[in-house]
Amino acid sequence: MCFRLLTSRLPFEGESATTLLVGKLGHSAPSLGQVTSEQWPALLERFIARALARHRDDRFPSAIEALEAWRDISDRFEQARARCRPLLDRLDAPAA
């Protein structure tokens, strides 16, 4: 769901269930950058890669742990935004 919200497409696509299954079993999910040709924050790319990992042992052990990781990412983005806010406010201020 997160991948689709960020890229507007599914990580695996196929015209039939068989094609989709073969693609999913034979390939790792593409990164956000591969799909969008844009650079994404590394921690977000790592989250997506782990959530969509082919092997169970490489994925989050539970939905709770995935949610905790997502909240950590959200907190980090909010902290970065708070650090940048004074600069953005100065840039938006009318010239004296």
Image (cartoon, rainbow, N blue to C red):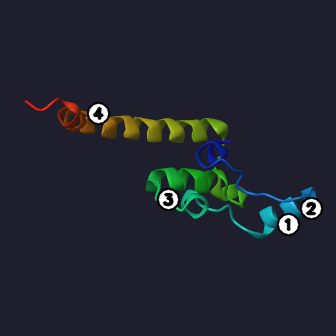
Q: Nearer the viewer, residue 88 or 67?
A: 88
First in sequence: mark 4 vs mark 3: 3
Amino acid type assigned to the residue bearing label 4 in the image: Ala
Q: Secondary structure at mark 2?
A: helix
Report the mark closest to the observer, 1 or 3.
3
Report x, y in % for residue 47. Answer: 55, 50
- Position of the N terminus by quadrant: top right
In space, the residues marked 4 and 3 are separated at their CA atoms by 24 Å
The picture quadrant where one finds residue 86 is: top left
First in sequence: mark 3 vs mark 2: 2
Report the mark closest to the observer, 3 or 2.
3
Instruction: Classify 10 Å Cα crowding around label 4: few (below 14), some (14-19), many (20 and above).
Output: few
Q: Residue at x 44, y 53 (%)?
A: 41
Q: Nearer the viewer, residue 78 or 33?
A: 33
Report the mark closest to the observer, 4 or 3.
3
Instruction: Classify 10 Å Cα crowding around label 1: few (below 14), some (14-19), many (20 and above).
Output: few
Q: Residue at x 91, y 58 (%)?
A: 16
Q: Nearer the viewer, residue 59 or 40?
A: 40
Q: Which label sits on residue 18?
A: 2
Q: Are marks 4 and 2 in contact (CB under 8 Å)?
A: no
The residue that label 4 is drawn on is: 82
Q: Secondary structure at mark 4?
A: helix
The residue that label 1 is drawn on is: 22
Report x, y in % for residue 45. Answer: 52, 55
Q: Are marks 2 and 1 in contact (CB under 8 Å)?
A: yes
In space, the residues marked 4 and 2 are separated at their CA atoms by 47 Å
Amino acid type assigned to the residue bearing label 1 in the image: Val
Q: Secondary structure at mark 1?
A: helix
Amino acid type assigned to the residue bearing label 3 in the image: Glu
